[in-house]
Image (cartoon, grey):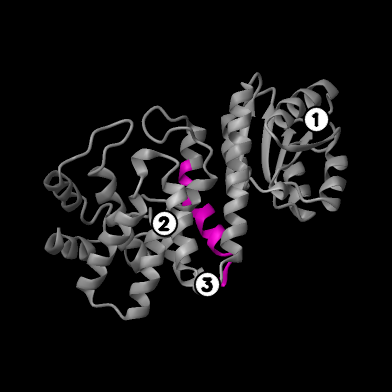
């Protein structure tokens, strides 16, 4: 971990809570500062960028969304983790949509806190690397994607397979070379926003908050790619790759031809790989069964035109 990515700020009006969290994070190698109020925290982030900010939700001077707004208005790009005595799932979901990294309820396990801080730092590192990519970036970009996939051995190679399936459809369509390259990049990067999803396991048994985190990954991915103009043409495909033809998808509930072409293609490619690969919570389908499942969803989850091309290839 780079030294500059270890900066963490603990914000709580209770001295003992601040010092307890500080002790455990310093043990893990983080550089930790503390603040006893929201206004003190704001002043500190003006002087020093913090990668992670862990704050009580119920600060006496700035509560919840007001504290988040104050940080954002004062230039903080750090990941914010709220801790609350009075858990509220609806409030947590609302804050996640506004950009909060996670929302913990007391009492919490310190290992959970350490996990969240680690994931927040990983996201900050990825943001820096994406922003700094220049022309001739294929090798470093591919390495970043491999790193994201490697976080879960069930997903190892997932982005490459989605890219390969998407390209088969693209080649069948005979699209111009530039469009082919843009969709290839988008297919590789479609799950880049998962780096900002602090969920231990994706699958059955997820809480409402966990599902909201997962549903935010296209938005997070699009925001990360927007940091570098190299990826401007790939952003619509990444942002909308979980939209559904019938309008039941996310994040914008687009439907039909309003869904960008690249997103329609990546959607089928991603689902085909997902259901033909073992996951921690289910076994893989056979390719024939997966093919029939996708055909069955034509006009519902998937654009009928893309399904027709899929049928010719797979």
Q: In this orientation, does residue 305 appear?
A: yes
x and y, in percent, of residue 235 in the image: 48, 65
Q: Which residue is mark 1?
A: 12
Q: Residues within 10 Å of mark 1 (few under 14, many from 20)?
A: many
Q: Residue at x 36, y 76 (%)?
A: 179
How many other residues sit within 10 Å of disc 3, few (<14), some (14-19) or many (≥20)?
Answer: some
Considering only order in the chain, which callout, 1 or 2, is on the residue closer to the N terminus? 1
SS at badge 1: loop
Give the residue number, with chain letter if any, for mark 3: 230
Is label 3 in a helix, a strand or a loop?
Answer: helix
The answer to if 297 sits in the magenta stretch is: no
Residue 153 is drawn in which quadrant? Answer: top left
On the picture, is 218 further left or further right than 314? right
* Residue 297 % position (x, y): 21, 50
- Image quarter hosting the N terminus: top right
Q: Mark 2 or 3 closer to N-term?
A: 2
Magenta region: 214-230
Residue 260 showing in the rendered view: no
Residue 221 lies in magenta, yes or no?
yes
Count of number-bearing discs? 3
Marks 3 and 1 sit apart, C-alpha to C-alpha, by 40 Å
């Amino acid at each position: 971990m780079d030294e500059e990515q270890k900066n963490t700020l603990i914000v709580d009006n209770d001295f003992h809570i601040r010092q307890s969290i500080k002790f455990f994070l310093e043990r893990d190698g983080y550089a930790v500062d503390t603040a006893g109020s929201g206004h003190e925290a704001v002043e500190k982030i003006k002087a020093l960028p913090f990668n992670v900010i862990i704050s009580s939700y119920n600060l006496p001077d700035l509560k919840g969304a007001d504290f988040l707004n104050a940080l954002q208005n004062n230039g903080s790009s750090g990941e914010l983790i709220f801790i609350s005595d009075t858990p509220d799932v609806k409030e947590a979901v609302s804050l996640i949509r506004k950009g909060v990294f996670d929302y913990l309820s007391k009492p919490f396990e310190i290992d959970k806190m350490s996990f969240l801080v680690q994931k927040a730092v990983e996201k900050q590192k990825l943001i820096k690397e994406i922003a700094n990519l220049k022309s001739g970036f294929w090798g470093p970009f591919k390495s970043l994607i491999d790193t994201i996939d490697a976080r879960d051995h069930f997903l190892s190679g997932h982005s490459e397979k989605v890219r390969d399936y998407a390209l088969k459809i693209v080649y069948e369509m005979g699209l111009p070379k530039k469009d082919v390259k843009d969709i290839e990049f988008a297919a590789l990067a479609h799950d880049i926003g998962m780096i900002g999803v602090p969920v231990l396991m994706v699958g059955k048994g997820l809480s409402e908050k966990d599902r909201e985190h997962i549903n935010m990954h296209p938005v997070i991915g699009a925001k990360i790619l927007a940091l570098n103009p190299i990826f401007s043409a790939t952003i619509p495909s990444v942002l909308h790759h979980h939209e559904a033809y019938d309008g039941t998808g996310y994040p914008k509930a687009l439907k039909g031809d309003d869904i960008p072409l690249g997103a329609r293609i990546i959607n089928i490619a991603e689902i085909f790989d997902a259901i033909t690969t073992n996951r921690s919570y289910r076994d893989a389908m056979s390719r024939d069964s997966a093919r029939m499942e996708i055909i069955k969803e034509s006009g519902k989850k998937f654009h009928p035109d893309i399904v027709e091309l899929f049928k010719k290839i797979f």
